[in-house]
């Protein structure tokens, strides 16, 4: 087993100049460095997207506020959504996948390292292009700044007539470019996972994190492509006079909605599936039990990916589709809850009878379980088309999807950060600070997003920059905004913890959590080549076999 | 390459869906049956180019670079004929029939779908040309057979897409 690194002779060399070290990072094709760059990039944009959300919430804290103009509010709304989905969630998740998958399958790098680097830099450029719109969106007509058409950019608002200047073009092209990066990453994941597993690692012995990244990559290929196609169509409409979404020439604005949501719905599953991966790795280790029902977990994940391709029009129940279409999408949306529920049961089954350790990663995973369940339930509520007619376009929908994204995805991400931080940096984070982060963020999250369901039910529409007093929304909006500040505090502590621990944290060693997958057999941080000798595995928990040669897993699998 | 083909198929599918959805919905002419002629010769050229590349790859696997070069050149030539024919067809449609991408829904969906395909053909021709140059310079060896095979997959994909586009645009859509 390759738990040793190749010994290098000790030398007293001075630290290399900073320009050389930075250059290393810029030209690297090493999956670990690229993974860390993706993650850092996403974290920076997390702060920026958070500022945009805070601006919106301050505007909504009291009725008839004038903290920002309506136009600025629309830009904040669009940029917040676009940033968080494309330049926070996707980069961080691709970053974790990039870092972990080769280590977990016993490979030395991804299948296509240069494609990996190309994909990262395309994504990075896309984000910078989007933010350049604040400066460059004006164009020749002196109109437009950042895009203000919502992250879903419905037609015909995006046509030349209604979106003068280049704000929409910045939206379109930056996402088009980073979409190519995403497709490149997905191709890389699939090739790596299918061809580069170490000897003995059959697909049935692969860690769930690798399986789920494989499923996610397949879904990315199918999901990003419709967005690419739709964006090309939008550019053709705007600049070559095409009529895809031009109702005056017989085109259809709703077909944009179909194309966008054919992308948009699988996209959110692309975001959540790697989070399932993290939770499936962390919960077993902190329950001291192997994952309950591994084959069913794989099957459920594949099932979720397939069904998620058929539910897109549940974002469009209110546009006047006929009742057959409405029923079909309502049913498929309810069906996708079944494999998801199976996974939740399996995670609970993993914890059942285990010896649970309430360290920070586990706290965030427990929060994930609870919150993802509730988010799923509000989703099922919304899937009933007639109920949806009441709640579509209201803050209930906003509450639902933020519950999934913040309560589900972000909590799982925090868990993953704390769990793998010792591996990537070689240092332990500060556990007391991490707990403070957890509780502050939990309080803030629930204050904001639990309450947010209520204005929705009371009829408060979304996408509005202010509202009338006297409808019972004022106190709720105030408390919702207060919750934002708790979350900000939590995130600041998180960033401070990561930063401080980098220098002052206790040295972690190879395997601080007594875990079972291959990445814990390397040093912390791993050497550039990952494994001196490629490992040979005989079960799903190769490190358990090593540590317990009298009771190895392969006897029972 | 299979993954990339998978993703590209999804992109083409969306354009085909748009084409099919908008069939018969143009508010003004010209209409497909007025202006479209079946590009039989060009299609035969493109389909044959799949056959020629299919013969080229085993030749390279065996190390027979001369035979490989001949089949590869044939692929390049047939693909170029197809593209030139598309260009002539478009010239005819634009200048003689008055159909542009902004004329009506048919123009929009026709040019975008056929254009997307032609764009992929162009990329393929660039790859074929590059391969041809390397073969003539003697640098393309038996060791590169796997890479040539991967490229051939892309070319077969482009061909398969044309079969779909041809059926949808020239047969069903008329």
Image (cartoon, helix red, strand yellow):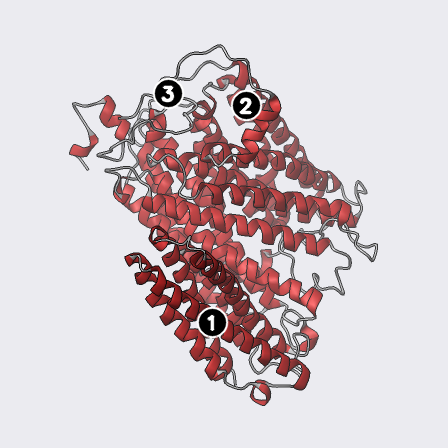
> Residue A29 in the image: x percent, y percent?
48, 37
Tag count in the figure?
A: 3
Q: Is residue A335 visible?
A: no
Residue in view at x 30 percent, y 62 percent: B58
Q: Between A305 and B40, which is closer to the camera in this rendering?
A: B40
Which chain's residue wears label 1? B
> In whole angstroms, how far apart are the C-alphas of marks 1 and 3?
59 Å
Q: Is residue A243 above or below residue A14?
A: below
Residue A498, numbered circle: 2
Question: Going from the N terminus, do you reach mark 2 or mark 3 first?
Answer: 2
> In whole angstroms, how far apart are the C-alphas of marks 2 and 1?
59 Å
Residue B77, numbered circle: 1
Marks 2 and 1: CB-CB under 8 Å? Answer: no
> Residue A537 in the image: x percent, y percent?
24, 33
Residue in view at x 59 percent, y 79 percent: B88
Dot 3 alpha-carbon crowd within 10 angstroms: few under 14, some 14 to 19, many 20 or more? some
Dot 1 alpha-carbon crowd within 10 angstroms: few under 14, some 14 to 19, many 20 or more? some
Q: Is residue B141 above or below residue A330?
A: above
Q: Farthest top residue? A: A12
């Amino acid at each position: 087993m390759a738990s040793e690194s190749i010994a290098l002779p000790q030398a007293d060399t001075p630290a290399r100049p900073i320009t050389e070290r930075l250059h290393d990072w810029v030209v690297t094709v090493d999956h670990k460095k690229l993974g860390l760059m993706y993650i850092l990039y996403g974290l920076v944009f997390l702060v920026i997207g958070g500022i945009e959300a805070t601006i919106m919430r301050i505007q909504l804290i009291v009725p008839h506020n004038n903290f920002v103009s309506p136009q600025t509010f629309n830009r904040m709304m669009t940029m917040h959504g676009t940033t968080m989905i494309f330049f926070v969630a996707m980069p961080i998740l691709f970053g974790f996948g990039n870092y972990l998958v080769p280590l977990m399958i016993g490979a030395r790098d991804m299948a296509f390292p240069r494609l990996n680097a190309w994909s990262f830099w395309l994504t990075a450029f896309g984000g910078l292009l989007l933010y350049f719109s604040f400066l460059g969106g004006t164009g020749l007509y002196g109109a437009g700044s950042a895009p203000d058409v919502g992250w879903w950019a419905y037609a015909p608002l995006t046509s030349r007539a209604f979106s003068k200047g280049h704000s929409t073009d910045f939206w379109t092209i930056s996402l088009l470019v980073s979409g190519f990066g995403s497709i490149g990453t997905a191709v890389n994941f699939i090739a790596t996972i299918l061809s580069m597993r170490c000897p003995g690692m059959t697909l049935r012995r692969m860690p769930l994190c690798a399986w789920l990244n494989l499923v996610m990559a397949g879904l990315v290929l199918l999901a990003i492509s419709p967005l690419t196609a739709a964006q090309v169509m939008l550019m053709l409409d705007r600049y070559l006079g095409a009529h895809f979404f031009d109702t005056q020439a017989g085109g259809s604005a709703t077909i944009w909605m179909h194309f966008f949501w054919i992308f948009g719905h699988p996209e959110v599953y692309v975001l959540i599936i790697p989070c399932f991966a993290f939770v499936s790795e962390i919960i077993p280790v902190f329950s001291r039990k192997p994952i309950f029902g591994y084959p069913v977990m794989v099957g459920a994940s594949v099932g979720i990916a397939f069904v998620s391709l058929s539910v897109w029009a549940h974002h469009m129940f209110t546009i006047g589709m006929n009742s057959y279409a409405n029923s079909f999408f309502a049913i498929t949306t309810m069906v996708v809850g079944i494999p998801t529920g199976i996974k939740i049961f399996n995670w609970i089954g993993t914890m059942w009878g285990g010896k649970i350790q309430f360290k920070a990663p586990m706290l965030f995973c427990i929060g994930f379980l609870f919150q993802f369940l509730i988010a799923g339930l509000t989703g099922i509520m919304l899937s009933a088309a007639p109920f949806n007619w009441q709640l579509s376009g209201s803050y209930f929908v906003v509450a639902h999807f933020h519950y999934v994204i913040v309560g589900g995805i972000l909590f799982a991400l925090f868990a993953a950060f704390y769990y793998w931080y010792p591996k990537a940096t070689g240092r332990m984070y500060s556990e007391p600070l991490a707990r403070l982060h957890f509780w502050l963020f939990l309080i803030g999250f629930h204050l904001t997003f639990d309450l947010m369901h209520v204005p929705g039910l009371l009829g408060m529409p979304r996408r509005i920059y202010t509202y009338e007093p006297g409808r019972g929304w004022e106190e709720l909006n105030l408390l919702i905004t207060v919750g934002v500040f708790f979350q900000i505090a939590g995130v600041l502590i998180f960033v401070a913890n990561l930063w401080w621990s980098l220098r002052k944290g206790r040295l972690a060693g190879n395997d601080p959590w007594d875990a079972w997958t291959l990445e814990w057999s390397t040093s912390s941080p791993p050497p550039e080549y990952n494994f001196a000798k490629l490992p040979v595995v005989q079960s799903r928990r190769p490190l358990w076999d090593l540590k317990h040669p009298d009771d190895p897993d392969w006897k029972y699998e | 390459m299979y993954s990339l083909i998978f993703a590209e198929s999804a992109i083409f599918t969306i354009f085909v869906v748009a084409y099919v959805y908008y069939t018969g919905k143009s508010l003004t002419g010209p209409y497909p049956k007025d202006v479209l002629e079946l590009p039989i010769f060009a299609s035969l050229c493109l389909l044959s180019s799949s056959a020629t590349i299919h013969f080229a790859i085993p030749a390279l696997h065996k190390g027979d670079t001369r035979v490989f070069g001949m089949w590869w050149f044939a692929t390049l030539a047939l693909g170029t004929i197809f593209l030139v024919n598309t260009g002539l067809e478009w010239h005819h449609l634009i200048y003689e029939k008055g159909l542009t991408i902004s004329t009506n829904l048919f123009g929009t969906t026709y040019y975008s779908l056929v254009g997307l395909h032609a764009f992929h053909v162009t990329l393929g021709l660039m790859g074929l040309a590059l391969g041809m140059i390397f073969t003539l310079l003697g640098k393309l060896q038996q060791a590169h057979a796997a890479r040539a095979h991967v490229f051939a997959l892309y070319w077969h994909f482009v061909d398969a897409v044309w079969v779909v586009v041809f059926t949808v645009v020239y047969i069903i859509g008329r």
